[in-house]
């Protein structure tokens, strides 16, 4: 068998020159010896999959409360769809498939129970305590602080390329004056859009399955109507045809952006001021119209809203209750992370599955 370094060198020859190479660029926070067989980002993927936070995704709401219907997406199946789309895009664009996969698998680890409604409730509660809550930041906190891998390092000690990929929202406030933030790798950029492609596709599917809107209604949206026409011709589903349209547009728009940006190396990617993995402006507009439809008919549907409200009440009540009388688990968490009590309460509640939160609130 070839040595790891030989295999890495060989695999790198298949990558575009602006991809993140298989040995990585920025390394781990604490240096570790190489694995005998797995590439560094493959190891990161395995660490992510073996966390408790990853397993709990199966009990967390995507849009529909877990258990309400058997065939709609949970946070776990959504994550698997994002990982699958990310790998395909990475391979087609000759980017680093392992890196994209690892970022995709970790991207929603920080999601609290009850989906975005849960996120809003935690943010409201944390704001009252002088903080805030945002699921991307929580994903990063999980892999860098909360989860354990080895007593030799805090968190999972992942490669910095993964951490960077989880930091979706770098604001101008995070960057020293006069300095431009380095752009994320193309692998991180593509996972962002793979996430959007996945939820746009599956939310159409789930909304119809739950009978919140009909095929006739969604056909009124130009992008859905085109996808349905293609689906009839290709004998496939609306979801499949929609993903195909979005991914194809992403390939041509990103190719063009990489060419017009004269991107030849990974350093060029970092110096570029805009996202190079992108949709065309026509497609952005079409997706916007479809999102408006989904907001009206799905996310703001009274049936979804009622469940969201219930979820928010549960989260707020749990946070208040645990702040007044913290469980031993919460004080242990506080000691381990050196954080304030509200922060430890937030970490504990954000980690819960929907069912566990419901049980605890009874
Ligand atoms: Mg997501």
Image (cartoon, rainbow, N blue to C red):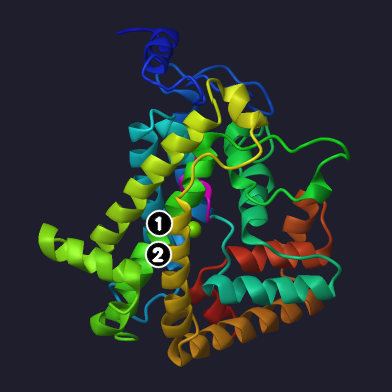
The answer to whether residue 55 of the structure is visible from this angle is no
**Range of residues picked out in magenta:** 103-108
Name, please, the residue furthest toward the right.
177
Q: Which residue is mark 1?
A: 197
Residue occupying the point 66% across, 64% down? 348
Q: Position of residue 191 (x, y in %)?
A: 48, 46
Q: Which residue is mark 2?
A: 200
230 within the magenta span: no
- Tell me the element at label 1: helix
Residue occupying the point 28% across, 72% down? 71
The foreground one among 223 and 339 is 223
Q: Quadrant of residue 345?
A: bottom right
The foreground one among 194 and 45 is 194
Left or right: residue 4 versus residue 320 is left
Determine contact: label 2, label 1, CB under 8 Å: yes
- Tell me the element at label 2: helix
Residue 35 vertical placement versus 113 (above, below): above
Residue 284 vertical placement versus 47 (above, below): below
């Amino acid at each position: 068998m070839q040595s790891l370094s030989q295999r890495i060198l060989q695999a790198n020859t298949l990558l575009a020159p602006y991809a993140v190479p298989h040995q990585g660029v920025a390394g781990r926070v604490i240096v570790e010896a190489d694995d005998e067989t797995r590439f560094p980002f493959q190891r990161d993927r395995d660490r992510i999959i073996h966390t408790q936070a990853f397993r709990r995704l199966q009990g967390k709401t995507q849009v529909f409360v877990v258990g309400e219907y058997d065939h709609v997406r949970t946070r776990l199946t959504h994550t698997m769809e994002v990982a699958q789309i990310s790998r395909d895009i990475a391979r087609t664009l000759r980017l680093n498939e392992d890196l994209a996969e690892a970022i995709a698998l970790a991207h929603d680890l920080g999601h609290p129970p009850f989906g975005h409604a849960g996120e809003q409730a935690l943010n409201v509660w944390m704001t009252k305590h002088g903080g805030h809550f945002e699921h991307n930041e929580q994903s990063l906190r999980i892999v860098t602080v909360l989860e354990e891998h080895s007593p030799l390092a805090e968190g999972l000690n992942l490669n910095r390329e993964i951490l960077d990929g989880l930091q979706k929202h770098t604001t101008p406030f995070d960057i020293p004056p006069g300095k431009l933030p380095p752009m994320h790798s193309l692998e991180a950029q593509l996972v962002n859009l793979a996430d959007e492609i996945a939820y746009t596709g599956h939310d159409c599917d789930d909304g119809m399955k739950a009978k919140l809107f009909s095929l006739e209604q969604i056909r009124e949206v130009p992008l859905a109507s085109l996808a349905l026409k293609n689906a009839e011709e290709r004998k496939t589903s609306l979801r499949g045809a929609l993903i195909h349209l979005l991914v194809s547009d992403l390939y041509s728009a990103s190719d063009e952006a990489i060419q017009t940006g004269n991107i030849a190396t990974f350093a060029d990617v970092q110096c570029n001021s805009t996202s190079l993995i992108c949709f065309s402006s026509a497609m952005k507009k079409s997706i916007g119209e479809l999102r408006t439809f989904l907001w009206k008919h799905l996310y703001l549907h009274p049936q979804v809203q009622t469940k969201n409200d219930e979820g928010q009440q549960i989260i707020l009540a749990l946070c208040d209750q645990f702040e007044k009388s913290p469980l031993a688990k919460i004080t242990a968490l506080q000691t381990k992370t050196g954080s304030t009590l509200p922060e430890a309460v937030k970490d504990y509640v954000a980690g819960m599955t929907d069912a566990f939160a419901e049980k605890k609130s009874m």
